[in-house]
Amino acid sequence: MSTRPLALITGASSGIGAELAHTFADRGYDLVLLARRRDRLERVAAQAEERGAAVETFTADLATPQGLASAAERAANGDVALLVSNAGNAGYAPLKDVPAPDVDGLWRLNATAPVTLAHAVLPSLLDKGEGHIVTVASLLAFSAGMRSFSSANATTPLTMPPRTLYAAAKSATVAFTRTLANELAGTGVGATVICPGRVATEWSAGQNQHGPDVMSARDVATATALAVERGDTVCVPGLAKAEALERLQEAETDLVSDGNRSVLADRYQPRP
């Protein structure tokens, strides 16, 4: 019987998920790898086994109620020490152009699944007094007010993708994980949200694979593993100065404190 801790990784058939599987196998974990594409999942599993991990594969589509329910049942089995909710789909489009049948599935995959799986695995982690929950979000979670941004290494501004549904889902994931981390303080169980920028994967039809300022999936996986080891709550793999996260929290505190008043602000007072 293996004495290695067990990591359940969703979206593990390619890209960041595959690199997460390799990275945590190298760091002494056995794996449950979950994705929709069994053939590619088996390939990643074989590579992880070559790294010394015992690997179980689990095929499910987390965008469907049935797939998410089956994944939650596996997560609740009591043997998972590390949950990594990585599965996602950009679905980049103006909201008016998203087909109505796709709205629920995209939201379920990007926002509901990390919550459902965390809820499923949490009782056993708390009983053991150890373990970790990781969600993979995106820098786009912080982009709601941005129309475009400039890259220091680019000669022209880069237009943000149409992302209303995706950014909302990832913002929810960030808020969920940060709040959960506070809730879990002192229990021995941690929570970390990963917020990468553009990554060289098949994501969004592979449009970032050869662009400037694009991080490798391996580096994102490395940052994830280190963030788990250190107990970071928010991990932005490409962020050079962590003070930006401190300023974000200060701004949030100021907004909530200053906005919580019993009278209307002057700018909302009726004018005679």
Image (cartoon, rainbow, N blue to C red):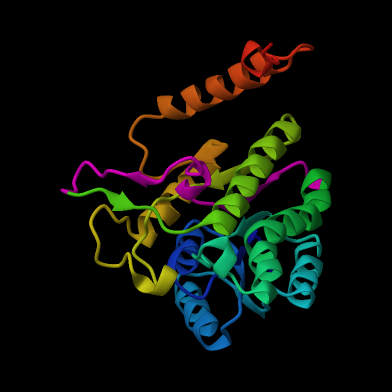
**In the rendered structure, which segment of residues is drawn in magenta?**
128-155
Q: Is residue 169 left or right of residue 183?
A: left
Judge whether 48 appears above or below 107 on screen: below
Residue at 52%, 62% in the rendered image: 94
Q: Residue furthest front?
A: 272
Residue occupying image coordinates x 47% and y 22%:
247
Say whether residue 174 is magenta. Answer: no
Q: Position of residue 229 (x, y in %)?
A: 53, 42
Q: Is residue 173 visible?
A: yes
Left or right of residue 192, residue 221 in this image: left
Q: Nearer the viewer, residue 50 or 57?
A: 57
Q: x, y percentage for residue 11?
A: 56, 69
Q: Quadrant location of residue 209?
A: bottom left
Above or below 269: residue 95: below
Give the vertical position of 199 relative to 148 (above or below).
below
Whether residue 62 is visible here, answered yes or no, is no
